[in-house]
Amino acid sequence: MPQFITTAPPSEDADELLAQMPGWPLRWGISLMFGVVLLLLGLAWFVKYPDVIKGKITITTNTPPATVVARAGGPIHLLTADKALLAANEVFATIGGTARYDDVVVLHQALDSFRVMLDTDRLSAATQSETVSLPDGLELGDLQIPYNALLLRWKEWQALAVRGNSNRQRKGIVNEQIGGFDQIDTRLNRQLELLEQEYALLRRTYETRYRPLQQSGSISVEQLEVKRDELIAKTKAIEAARATIAENENRIIALRSQKAEYDFDQTDRQLAAHNELRDAFTGLLNAITTWQTTYVLKAPIAGRLNYLNFMHENSVLVAGQEVAGIVPPPSNSSTTRSGLAVPGLAGSYVGELFIEPAGSGKVVVGQMVNITLLSFGKKEFGMLRGRVATVADISTTLSAGGQPQTVYKLYVSLPKGLTTTVNKKLPFRYGLEGTAEVITKDIRVIERIFDSVRAAFSN
């Protein structure tokens, strides 16, 4: 049989011993807990760290590059190679038209001497008329019409300026004018024939070559429109030539009727001829200016030429196409190309930073900005350090992935330029992009805890 062992109840001494807890563990435990709490509170008070506001940044200069846009379509004629240094307003290319650029330059230089004659007194100019000549044999295209008009007025002015006032001399002048206008009429008719032949050739090429090529997809609609615009321009040139011929013939008829006149006021005739000559001169200058604006590509600022696409001689452009960018040399000034100074900016390089509205209220001028460029890895090249120079007072809207996004714009100065935190100087290229972290004001841990508690109770 199993045997049961009975345990005797504890004695009174044992109960008393077990009932008494020693005092030192309790005292030391409370002290330790109190010390830990004080340590945590001290750390929460002394430890502080900032918030980081992130955004996208682009590195540029105080003077951004200028973009040149084609105002007309057609083949391009390159006058300057890529990466060449250009002065402001220097011509680097032309867009194919009916006029030769070199001939237009020659004509423009000749008109400078012609302007001197027009700006002098009419009577004294009469003695200078033989020393002023206008070039011939130029390929002017659409500018030929206003140039012919100037030649007509010039012939009339010369005839009036070198002749006397007698009726006999007047008849001689009229006869010379008629002879000159007859020659001009012959030349105009010859030019009209050439224009009509060119139009017929263009029309045939358009109908038999370019239209089928466009229909088969070999060329684009824009290229077909370029040829159609050439047809339209040629049609206008033909109509203008016919109008000039009609005007010239009307003048011949009028001059022949004037041969019967014996008395007229030579001074009034000179005044009228001078005014007509000046009007024709002004009209030609305006036509040249319009032609240059449309077909000549100039550098709006001084800098290095950068073609935006692979440009070759006779590459076809379309109207509105961006052709080139002119990159100015870096400037240490904080003045932009518009002439307005950006407060807080110093040095050659500037960061254009966009941040989201969340946390943007913590960003103030002078805060540090850490910049990591996409083109230069952080591990190898380090970061750029900058300072917030300006903060926009109002937000702006950008299109990100087809969706509008509200952001604030910041300018970031780079006191050390493109020298990174590992003392590497980065080469500059326009459009360098990266991410930026704005280091805001340090906040204590205990303040963050109280803010969280207050926010929890306020909700």
Image: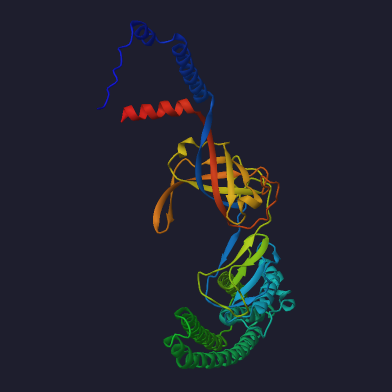
Furthest residue toward left: 1
Q: Position of residue 394 (x, y in %)?
A: 44, 42
Of 139 and 60, nearer the camera is: 60
Q: Position of residue 301 (x, y in %)?
A: 64, 59
The residue sitting at 63% across, 58% down in the picture is: 429
The vertical placement of 419 against 210, above or below, is: above
Q: Position of residue 414 (x, y in %)?
A: 63, 44
Q: Quadrant of the C terminus?
A: top left
Q: Quadrant of the N terminus?
A: top left
Left or right for 304, reference 38: right
Of 400 and 453, nearer the camera is: 453
The vertical placement of 112 against 203, above or below, is: above
Q: Position of residue 159 (x, y in %)?
A: 65, 81
The residue sitting at 70% across, 73% down in the picture is: 109
Furthest residue toward front: 1
Name the quadrant containing residue 269: bottom right
The residue sitting at 51% across, 74% down in the picture is: 318
Is residue 297 visible from the viewing direction of this image? yes
Is residue 337 visible from the viewing direction of this image? no
Of 275 and 301, nearer the camera is: 301
Name the quadrant containing residue 342: top right
